[in-house]
Image: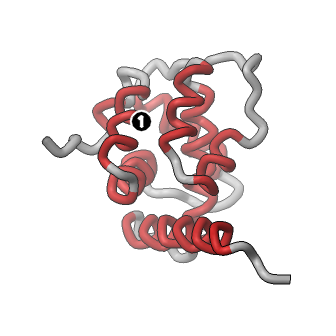
Amino acid sequence: MTQPIDVERATELYRDWLIALKQQAALATINQSQAMMRAVMVQLRRALAPDQVLAVANALPALPRGIFIEGWSLHDQMVVPASADAFLGQVRAQLEAHHAPPASLVQDVFAIWHRFLPAPNARTIGACLPPVLQPLWPAVDA
């Protein structure tokens, strides 16, 4: 059975993200890229109000959108990080059993999103970030 072209394209695009993240973060494998991407997504989702979760999800392409909202509920308790370092610590804790990620892991994931997303989508995500995470988001092109 063949895959519909949109599923193949979504998979290809997401693989491009993972390859770019592998290069950006100097990782050994795209499995590490996937673990980093998912950890940042899960932690970011926890730091956002439901309307922001949906806005970020809608700014992402189909496959990353599904990963971002997988397991999420409107009733999840929002946990706003006290600082960027606290957020990084929460993300790193999710990765401890998998690999030792670089200190720049959040910025690396955000950089990939910013690079691959259309500018309006990138601006939407940047605007939804909690204030303590906004300095980690790449500057929006004028």
Question: Is residue 32 found left or right of 59 in the rendered image?
Answer: right
Above or below, 72 relative to 34: above
Tag 1 residue = 125
Few, some or many residues within 10 Å of mark 1 (<14, 14–19, 20+): many
Residue extending furthest right?
1
Residue at the image point whose x is 42% and y is 28% from the top? 129
Question: Is residue 140 found left or right of 76 in the rendered image?
Answer: left
Residue at the image point whose x is 53% and y is 19% from the top? 80
Query: What is the secondary structure assignment of the residue under circle 1?
Result: helix
The colour scheme applied to this rendered structure is secondary structure
Please state the horizontal and vertical placement of residue 78, each as a whole percent of the image: 63, 17
Residue extending furthest bottom?
1
Front position in the image: 68 or 108: 68
Specify the amino acid type for callout 1: Ile
Residue at the image point whose x is 51% and y is 35% from the top? 56
Residue at the image point whose x is 70% and y is 16% from the top? 77
User: Splitting the image into 4 quarters, where does residue 23 fall?
Assistant: bottom left
Question: Is residue 99 found left or right of 117 in the rendered image?
Answer: right
Location of the N terminus (image quadrant): bottom right
Front position in the image: 84 or 78: 78
Please state the horizontal and vertical placement of residue 86, each as a whole percent of the image: 49, 29
Q: How many marks?
A: 1
User: Splitting the image into 4 quarters, where does residue 140 fall?
Assistant: top left
Above or below, 18 relative to 68: below
Please state the horizontal and vertical placement of residue 33, each as a whole percent of the image: 55, 64
User: Splitting the image into 4 quarters, where does residue 12 fall?
Assistant: bottom right
Front position in the image: 114 or 35: 114
Please state the horizontal and vertical placement of residue 62, each as a whole percent of the image: 61, 53
Question: Is residue 91 found left or right of 141 in the rendered image?
Answer: right
Residue extending furthest left?
142
Above or below, 109 relative to 43: below
